[in-house]
Structures are given as structure tokens and as C-alpha cells.
């Protein structure tokens, strides 16, 4: 006894599955790409915010800080670390500015005295000994500066 069934119906079903699959795969790829891009952008936005804040910071304006979101994740730790570094840099730059201002002030007084002595010596003709005295005095002032 032999039993035979027609395969036509099974082939039609397989053809429909194949057509459906061909239509859904590109659509799925498009949706996965769009969704993946949106998720990646959302995940990387805090990195972009940190980068933008870092670009705004200059040697003249170290008061800018990176926003901490309060999520206590790695990006918050990075922002806190950057803010700590900026605070230390701001302190160091302040010390350098104060040192430069103090050095300029400390140099101004002896240089003014040196200039005054030279100007007085040049106002009138002097003897060689008087010029030597001005030069000795000027040399002493320079040695005090060094």
C-alpha cells in the first residue's frame, strides 16, 4: 500500500515564509540600526557633556567645573576626578600669579633706585671717580637683586 500526498501546499507555505522573511530581515536591520544608534547616543551624551565642559576651560578661567549627575557611575567618578584636578590647577595658577606679582614688586623698588642713580649721574658732567662711585653703587644694587 502506498500513500501519496501532494507537496504543493507545503511548498506554498514555505514560499510565503521565505517571502515574509525577505521582507522582515531588512526591516529588522533598519530598526536595529536606528534603535542601536539612539541607545548609543543616549549612553554617550554624558561623555559629550564632559568633553564640552573640558573644552570651555582655559588657563584664564579655571573656575569652570564639570557637572556631576549624581548617578555615582564611572562618568560621575570621572567628572569628580576632573573637578579635583581643576581645583588643584586653579590653586597652582593662583600661587604662580601671586609669586609673579610679588617678584615684580620686589624688583621694581631696587630697579627704580638703580635707574635714579644712573639718571642723576648722567645729568651733568662728572669726574671719573664720581662715575666709578655711581657704577659701584649700581653694581652693589644689582648684586642684591641676584
Image (cartoon, helix red, strand yellow):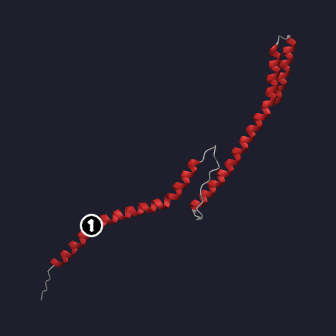
- Residue drawn at (82%, 23%) of the image: 139
Question: What is the quadrant of residue 82 in the picture?
Answer: bottom right
The residue sitting at the left extreme is 1
In the drawing, does residue 88 fall left or right of residue 20? Answer: right
Question: What is the quadrant of residue 125 in the picture?
Answer: top right
The answer, for residue 146, to whether it is visible in the render is no
Image position, residue 43 (x, y; %) = 49, 61
Image position, residue 7 (x, y; %) = 16, 78
Residue at which label 1 appears: 23
The answer, for residue 8, to whether it is visible in the render is yes
Image position, residue 109 (x, y; %) = 81, 30
The residue sitting at the front extreme is 123
In the drawing, does residue 14 fall left or right of residue 130? Answer: left
The residue sitting at the bottom extreme is 1
**Count of marks overlaid on the render:** 1
| Relative vertical location of residue 86 with respect to residue 138 in this rendering, above or below | below
Image position, residue 129 (x, y; %) = 87, 13
In the drawing, does residue 85 fall left or right of residue 115? Answer: left
- Residue drawn at (49%, 58%) of the image: 44
- Residue drawn at (25%, 70%) of the image: 20
- Residue drawn at (64%, 54%) of the image: 83
In the drawing, does residue 59 fall left or right of residue 142? Answer: left
Instruction: Check disc 1: other Cα within 10 Å, few if <14, some if 14-19, many if 20+.
Output: few
| Relative vertical location of residue 138 with respect to residue 44 in this rendering, above or below | above
Where, quadrant-wise, is the C terminus in this rendering?
Answer: top right
Comparing 5 with 41, the one in front is 41
Give the secondary structure at mark 1: helix
Where, quadrant-wise, is the N terminus in this rendering?
Answer: bottom left
Amino acid at each position: 500500500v502506498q500513500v501519496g500526498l501532494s507537496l504543493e501546499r507545503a511548498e506554498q507555505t514555505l514560499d510565503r515564509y521565505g517571502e515574509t522573511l525577505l521582507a522582515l530581515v531588512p526591516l529588522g536591520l533598519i530598526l536595529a540600526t536606528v534603535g542601536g544608534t539612539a541607545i548609543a547616543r543616549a549612553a554617550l551624551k554624558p561623555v559629550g557633556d564632559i568633553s564640552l565642559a573640558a573644552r570651555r576651560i582655559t588657563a584664564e578661567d579655571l573656575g569652570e567645573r564639570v557637572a556631576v549627575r549624581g548617578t555615582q557611575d564611572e562618568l560621575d567618578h570621572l567628572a569628580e576626578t576632573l573637578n579635583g584636578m581643576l581645583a588643584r590647577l586653579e590653586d597652582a595658577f593662583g600661587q604662580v600669579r601671586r609669586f609673579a606679582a610679588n617678584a615684580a614688586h620686589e624688583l621694581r623698588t631696587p630697579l627704580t633706585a638703580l635707574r635714579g642713580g644712573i639718571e642723576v649721574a648722567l645729568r651733568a658732567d662728572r669726574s671719573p671717580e664720581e662715575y666709578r662711585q655711581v657704577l659701584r653703587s649700581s653694581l652693589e644694587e644689582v648684586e642684591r637683586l641676584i
